[in-house]
Amino acid sequence: MEIMDGKALAAEIRAELKVKIEKMQQKPGLAVVIVGEDPASQIYVRNKIKACAELGIRSYSYELPETASQAELEELLDKLALDSDVNGILLQMPLPKNFDEDSAMAHIPVEKDVDGFTATNLGLLMQHKEKIVACTPLGVMKMLEKYGIDPAGKNAVVLGRSETVGKPMAMLLLNANATVTVCHSRTQNCKEICKKADILIAAVGKPKFVTADMVKDGAVIVDVGINRDENGKLCGDVDFQNVKEKASYITPVPGGVGPMTIAMLMYNTYLTACKE
Ligand code: NAP
């Protein structure tokens, strides 16, 4: 069994990007917009801004209160869309319940959509004409590539069908010629389906959801989940200690997919600046 070291790979990718960015006359600029005071979102945003600073990416942070209106948010996004100092716009999800996420996303021009969440970027992914791809699934693909795992012809099972992780993940694996099954909360026989997976991606958001009896010997296990266990300790969706005995490759939490997501955000921001 080999542990896929997302932290090390992310550091490698960031170091390569830093060299490329140093050579750019006009450094990339990322605007990060957060609405409300969700503590997890605030930590994610802080980490993203810190990563920008380390790479020489200019970052601009905008915080709107939960009481702001949809129109105020969209006005800000329209302003950033026109701002030539801003190459990428990141709208931290999820938005508070009273906001319409799809309507807000429609105010981010496709060429500034560093998260790959606009309808156009998702459509391009579906057509296998990817431009900017959602950071977490892209990070997973980079990790598989790094460890020489080619999805072509393999049975890949994706647990979860969110717009931000599960769906784009499934599409990337399909584009890479895997045979893909997507499981969700209404799936029957989830355990039997997972047992057939050569590559199993868990993006459910439930600690220890994937247990050893759901995993085939020699399977590749990628754990996207970020949860807290009963002791408040960070953990993924996979029962790591037991599942690792059966896996050929497995990602840890922390230190697996999480750091790759940030590295891919930096990569996408760099891409948006190169397209100018
Ligand atoms: P989400 O929007 O809550 O989606 C969870 C998915 O899991 C849904 O599609 C849901 O099905 C499915 N699900 C729920 N119960 C299930 C069950 N019993 N069997 C099979 N599927 C089930 O979550 P998300 O945004 O995709 O995130 C998933 C996890 O990844 C979370 O822990 C999140 O914190 C983490 N995450 C990590 C990163 C990273 O950088 N590592 C980035 C993003 C997210 P339905 O569609 O039927 O409800």
Image (spheres, rainbow, N blue to C red):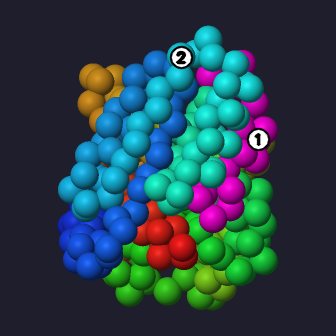
Residue 177 in sight in this render: yes
Which structural element holds mark 1? helix
Q: Which residue is mark 2?
A: 65
> Could you tell me which residue is drawn at 40 percent across and 42 percent down?
60
Residue 17, quarter of the rendered image? bottom left
The span picked out in magenta is 96-113
> Could you tell me which residue is drawn at 34 percent across and 33 percent down?
43
> Which three-letter amino acid code belongs to the residue tagged 1?
Asp
Report x, y in % for residue 271. Answer: 48, 72
> Could you tell me which residue is drawn at 76 percent across and 41 percent down?
102
> Could you tell me which residue is drawn at 47 percent across and 32 percent down?
62
> Which three-letter amino acid code belongs to the residue tagged 2?
Pro
Q: Which residue is mark 1?
A: 102
Q: Which of the two marks, 2 or 1, is nearer to us in this view? A: 2
Q: Which circle's residue, 2 or 1, is located before the other in the chain?
A: 2
Report x, y in % for residue 231. Answer: 27, 23
Residue 66, compared with residue 5, is above or below; it is above
